[in-house]
Image (cartoon, rainbow, N blue to C red):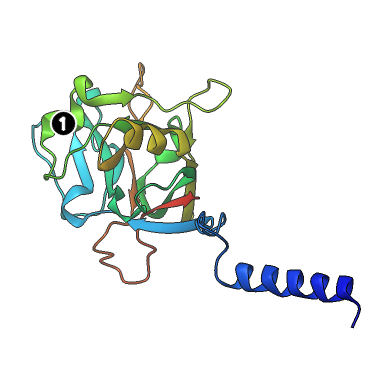
């Protein structure tokens, strides 16, 4: 066999073996592949909070709207997600809040869209102050890339509702928080109040046929 051909053959074989073993000392440059994780809300950390009353309900389905004719009859919903399911060292590239509207009561479609606030959260069951107090608001309301308030749509039809929260989850991780919390509320109403509530599924999924809330995070 020609010497030059033998050298080429040996070099090709060596390259094949090096690749199969994961390369040289640097390892495989593509070891961390893009992935996705679906984080469920925590049963004791989702629910409804009235703006007046100093109580927190984490057992019934989260609802947002007005339970009566006064501004103080406003009810806000909240959802909390444990971020420990995101692999350590991963870079979050996308995050989507996925909610499932289960029902409506009254005429909630007569009022303005539902606003979403980014809230500070710990690992404990939230207190009324943590859910209502402005000192726990990280961004209220969340705004899209154009600077407009991001909203969750609502109709009288059951179904999924989605909201991009990539920037908010990235901020929570960058600032050392282990949880992401989002609060849903109506735009403040100056005129007469229309009674109406919008209900969302929760971690308990009491109806069995609903889709539990989730935070879907893409990373690499």
Tag count: 1
Q: Element at badge 1? A: helix
**Relative side of 123 to 160, left or right:** left
Front residue of 74/49: it is: 49
Residue 35 position in % (x across, y down): 50, 58
Residue 1 position (above or below residue 84): below
The residue at 33%/37% (across/down) is 173
- Is there any visible trace of residue 184 in the rendered image? no
Residue 19 position (above or below residue 172): below
Front residue of 162/62: it is: 162
The residue at 18%/24% (across/down) is 133
Front residue of 66/200: it is: 200
Residue 45 position in % (x across, y down): 19, 48
- Residue 183 image-quadrant placement: top left
Residue 53 position in % (x across, y down): 9, 32
* Residue at image mark 1: 130
> In the image as oriented, which residue stretches furthest toward the front?
3
**Relative side of 46 to 90, left or right:** left
Category of crowding for the residue at label 1, using alpha-carbon neighbours closer than 10 angstroms: few (below 14), some (14–19), many (at least 20) = some
> In the image as oriented, which residue stretches furthest toward the bottom?
1
**Relative side of 196 to 21, left or right:** left
């Amino acid at each position: 066999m020609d010497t030059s051909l033998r050298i080429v053959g040996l070099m090709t074989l060596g390259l094949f073996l090096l690749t199969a073993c994961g390369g040289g000392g640097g390892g495989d440059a593509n070891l961390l592949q893009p992935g996705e994780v679906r984080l469920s809300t925590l049963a004791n950390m989702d629910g409804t909070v009235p703006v007046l009353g100093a109580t927190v309900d984490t057992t019934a389905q989260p609802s947002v709207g007005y339970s009566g004719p006064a501004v103080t009859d406003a009810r806000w919903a909240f959802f909390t997600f444990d971020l420990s399911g995101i692999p350590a060292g991963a870079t979050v590239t996308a995050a989507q809040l996925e909610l499932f509207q289960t029902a409506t009561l009254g005429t909630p479609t007569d009022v303005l869209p539902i606003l979403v606030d980014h809230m500070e959260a710990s690992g404990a069951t939230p207190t009324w102050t943590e859910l209502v107090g402005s000192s726990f608001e990280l961004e209220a309301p969340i705004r899209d890339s154009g600077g407009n308030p991001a909203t969750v749509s609502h109709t009288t039809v059951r179904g999924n509702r989605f909201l991009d929260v990539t920037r908010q989850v990235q901020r929570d991780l960058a600032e050392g928080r282990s949880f992401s919390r989002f609060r849903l509320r109506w735009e403040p109403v100056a005129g007469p109040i229309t009674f109406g509530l919008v209900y969302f599924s929760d971690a308990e999924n009491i109806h069995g046929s609903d889709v539990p809330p989730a935070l879907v995070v893409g990373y690499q």
